[in-house]
Amino acid sequence: IAKYRAARRIWARRMREKYGARDPRSWLMRFHTQTAGVSLTAQQPEVNLIRTAIEALAAVLGGTQSLHTNSFDEALALPTEHAVRLALRTQQVIAHETGVVNTIDPLGGSYYLEQLTNELERQAYDYFERIEELGGVIPAIEQNFMQREIAEASFRYQSEVERSERVVVGVNRYVQEDEQPIELLRIDPALEQKQIERVQAVRERRDAAAAEAALARLKEDAAHADRNLMEPMMAASRAYVTMGEMCDALREVWGTWRETPVF
């Protein structure tokens, strides 16, 4: 919750002070939230319903504008219709039965939450300074700064779990030895060929000249660092250029990024 509050304050301040935005509407950060896939466990997967509900409630209390709730079986497979329905019902219960949507900022004024918001904002600005000292985002990526931070955080988390310093219910505590497998979604292999045929049919029906022109424009604009690619990508979509074709076009211009492994 504090993370979202801090992010809104950072957005508003940076828009005004760094980018000179004068329209108050541009100071309002709109954001989408998805519950944490990393928190889903393959063990006792029904417990993921509880995790997702708590995470979704936190997102709403934090002021999210839109929300995706993960299905409880996604650590094992694509979700079944039953699992998806329960994920949807989680949002509906929060929206209609809890009352948390009846006020803009239900937890505003909580001394702990306000302190945590201030601390997260301070830490975020510390990160900004470290990245700027490296020369900006692109040099930081080239120096593996982000990858290293993520890898180190992941290692710390997993080490805490394995030492039982961090409890994960059903994984390192309250383990169920005779756990029964749940029903999983099975995809008919024939659907792959069906989708291939659908894409091929779209390519055959579209205006080939318009599609080629749209791809040529996308590659031309991608070769210039000062050009915004959103409009040419939208134009390519309107010409029924596939996502794969667009990605291939960008790879022709930019190549393929290979990050240096971080251990």
Image: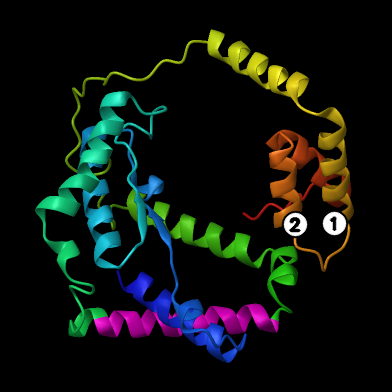
- Give the answer, above or below, for where 72 lies relative to 59: above
Give coordinates of residue 53: x percent, y percent. 22, 49
Residue found at x 33% / y 33%: 42
Give coordinates of residue 158: x percent, y percent. 41, 52
**Location of residue 49 (image quadrant):** top left
Q: Which mark is residue 19?
A: none
Q: Nearer the viewer, residue 200 or 36?
A: 200
Residue 228 visible from this viewpoint: yes
Give coordinates of residue 54: x percent, y percent. 22, 54
**Location of residue 213 (image quadrant):** top right
Please indicate whether residue 22 sits to the left or right of residue 119 in the image.
Answer: right
Q: Nearer the viewer, residue 174 or 23?
A: 23
- Give the answer, above or below, for where 208 lies relative to 169: above
Give coordinates of residue 156: x percent, y percent. 44, 60
Give the secondary structure at mark 2.
Answer: loop
Q: How is the image coloured?
A: rainbow
Looking at the image, the residue that sits furthest to the top is 190
Whether label 2 touches label 1, CB < 8 Å: yes
Residue 169 visible from this viewpoint: no
Q: Is residue 15 magenta?
A: no
Residue assigned mark 1: 221
Residue type at mark 1: give it: Asp
What span is colored magenta in the figure?
114-133
Q: 10 Å neighbourhood of mark 2: few (<14), some, or many (≥20)?
A: some
Please indicate whether residue 179 sits to the left or right of residue 187 in the image.
Answer: left
Residue assigned mark 2: 229
